[in-house]
Image (cartoon, helix red, strand yellow):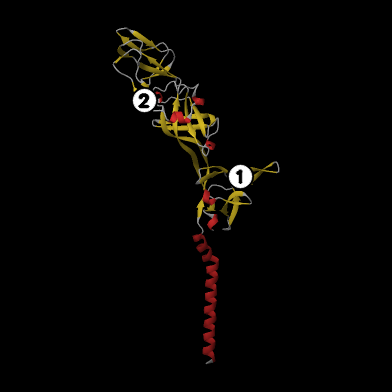
């Protein structure tokens, strides 16, 4: 009986030892794996952010409409949008044989809207938002076989320098900086320009941008809803949900070689409200009038996706 009892106790002790080993194994190896499974992380990668604004644009050009001095049959020598050299014959009227000669190197256009004297480079800084928005702008093609004296024949447009104006509210004006490059997305492609004026216009802000590039349908455009890209930055792209603060400084929690998540400060370049671009490897910050080099995130760092929930 004693031998059987001792054998039973021995088996129990062995079983307890095996259970203890299994528990210890689970604590050491399985628990971190389970914990990591519930810890949502993302890998930092390079990307870009465009700051985009959608506005109603009005086109301002140095342009001149020429009217018929006599009635007659029209003879055209240039097509819509062609560049006419100074001294070239643009139109001729018959039977009076009245010729219209280009005074400068300009584009010729047969589209008019009656607003040519409103949207001028000299007047664009004083235009009133409410007045402009209430204009009934209709662009008409005036190319035809004959004309009556006093009717418009064509207009000559300076395509070497033209402007776009638009109004934005106070919450969007910070997107624009005088002198900065912008990109305007138009139906036939994107054009590059720069912001030259930001004017307080009784609660709204008048933005004036200048362009020095060719656009095929420039002479036809007066008013259009378009996208404007005010900034295009590249850097490390991080979700704003991953960014938290510690001691008043923004940062993320980066997983180190031991598996621990360590707060790492970041320097935000720009943000679109959902994602932020941040500096890579290191950045400089002021501390007691000195520039201090601060270590920050790197590409392919693993960070907490949402530290506020962890």
Q: Secondary structure at mark 1?
A: strand
Disc 2 + disc 1, Cβ < 8 Å: no
Picture coordinates of residue 90, whole percent (x, y):
36, 13
**In the image: residue 96, left or right of residue 272:** left
Picture coordinates of residue 95, whole percent (x, y):
29, 7
Within 10 Å of disc 2 (Cα), the crowding (few <14, some 14-19, many 20+) is some
The relative height of residue 309 versus residue 74 in the rendered view (above or below) is: below
Q: Nearer the viewer, mark 2 or mark 1?
A: 2
Q: Quadrant of residue 83?
A: top left
The relative height of residue 51 versus residue 239 in the rendered view (above or below) is: above
Q: Which residue carries the number 2 mark?
A: 139
Observer-nearest residue: 109 or 78?
109
Observer-nearest residue: 108 or 55?
55
The relative height of residue 38 versus residue 234 in the rendered view (above or below) is: below
Quadrant that contains the C terminus: bottom right
Observer-nearest residue: 109 or 295?
109
Nearer the N terminus, badge 2 or badge 1?
2
What residue is drawn where x is 44% and y is 26%? 59
Q: Which residue is most to the top?
A: 96
Mark number for residue 282?
A: 1
């Amino acid at each position: 009986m004693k031998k059987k009892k001792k054998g039973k106790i021995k088996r129990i002790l062995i079983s307890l030892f095996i259970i203890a080993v299994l528990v210890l194994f689970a604590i050491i190896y399985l628990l971190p794996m389970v914990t990591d499974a519930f810890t949502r992380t993302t890998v930092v990668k390079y990307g870009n952010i465009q700051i985009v604004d959608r506005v109603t644009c009005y086109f301002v050009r140095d342009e001149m409409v020429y009217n018929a001095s006599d009635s007659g049959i029209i003879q055209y020598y240039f097509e819509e949008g062609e560049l006419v050299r100074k001294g070239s014959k643009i139109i001729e009227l018959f039977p009076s044989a009245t010729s219209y000669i280009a005074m400068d190197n300009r584009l010729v256009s047969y589209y008019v809207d009656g607003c040519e004297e409103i949207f001028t480079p000299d007047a664009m800084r004083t235009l009133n938002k409410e007045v402009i928005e209430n204009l009934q702008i209709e662009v008409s093609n005036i190319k035809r076989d004959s004309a009556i004296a006093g009717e418009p024949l064509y207009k000559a447009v300076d395509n070497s320098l033209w402007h776009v104006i638009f109004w934005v509210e106070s919450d969007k004006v910070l997107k624009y900086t005088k002198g900065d490059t912008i990109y305007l997305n138009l139906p036939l492609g994107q054009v590059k320009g720069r912001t030259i004026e930001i004017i307080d216009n009784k609660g709204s802000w008048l933005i004036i941008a200048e362009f020095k590039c060719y656009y095929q349908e420039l002479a036809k455009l007066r008013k259009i809803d378009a996208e404007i890209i005010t900034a295009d930055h590249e850097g490390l792209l991080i979700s704003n949900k991953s960014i938290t603060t510690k001691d008043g400084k923004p940062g993320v929690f980066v997983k180190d070689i031991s598996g621990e998540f360590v707060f790492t400060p970041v320097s935000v370049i720009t943000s679109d409200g959902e994602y932020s671009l941040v500096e890579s490897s290191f950045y400089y910050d002021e501390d007691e009038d000195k520039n201090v080099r601060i270590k920050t995130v790197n590409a392919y760092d693993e960070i907490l996706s949402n530290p506020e929930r962890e």
